[in-house]
Image (cartoon, rainbow, N blue to C red):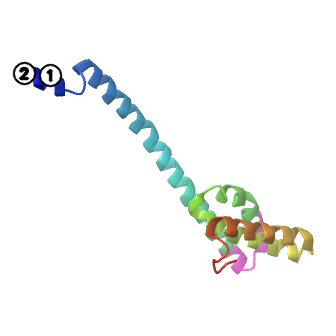
Amino acid sequence: MKQAQNNIFCSASECRKLSLLFSFIILFTYPFDFLNAQTTDQLNDQFEEAVRLYEFGDNESSRVLFNNFTDDICNHRQLIDKCIESQLYLSTFQRTDRNFEKAESLIDEASEIALNEWGKDHRVR
């Protein structure tokens, strides 16, 4: 009996507190992950829509979308490839406007992101 009591991890009141703590953590971290996933999906959808608009020749609408979400998309590690592509699309818009210095800085930024994320031997570099 004494041996069994020594093997118990916590008393009933302590275990209840621990279970409430773990429940609290799970209840409040799960929705955050869910919202983060939704945001990633929404950003991915916006990227796809901006590309479609660009391909159909609606460059101004595409530019507005890229300008609106590029900073947000670059904050999501899962979407880093889309971040790089967004930078390159934005550089295309700048070249169209003959802002060659801005276009070059956007290309350099995309290159820097690719180097930091994928290393110097990646095919994109």
The rendered magenta stretch, by its main secondary structure, is classed as helix
Q: For residue 105, what is the image quadrant?
A: bottom right
Foreground residue among 102 and 4: 4
The image shows residue 102 at horizontal and vertical percentages of: 88, 67
- What whole-number distance in Å separates the C-alpha atoms at marks 2 and 1? 6 Å
Name the residue at 67% across, 55% down: 72
Q: Quadrant of the C terminus?
A: bottom right
Task: Answer yes or no: is residue 62 visible.
Answer: no
- Left-right relation of 52 to 67: left
Task: Answer yes or no: is residue 116 visible.
Answer: yes
Q: Amino acid at mark 1?
A: Gln
Query: Tag 1's secondary structure?
Result: helix
Is residue 62 a member of the stretch shown in magenta?
Answer: yes
Q: For residue 59, what is the image quadrant?
A: bottom right
Q: Are marks 2 and 1 in contact (CB under 8 Å)?
A: yes
Find disc 2 in the rendering and name its residue.
1
Name the residue at 74% across, 71% down: 111
The image shows residue 41 at horizontal and vertical percentages of: 54, 60
Range covered by the magenta-colored residues: 52-64
Is residue 120 a member of the stretch shown in magenta?
Answer: no
Name the residue at 41% across, 35% down: 25
Find disc 1 in the rendering and name its residue.
5
Q: Amino acid at mark 2?
A: Met
Q: Is residue 63 above or below residue 16?
A: below
Foreground residue among 5 and 18: 5
The image shows residue 8 at horizontal and vertical percentages of: 19, 26
Q: For residue 56, what is the image quadrant?
A: bottom right
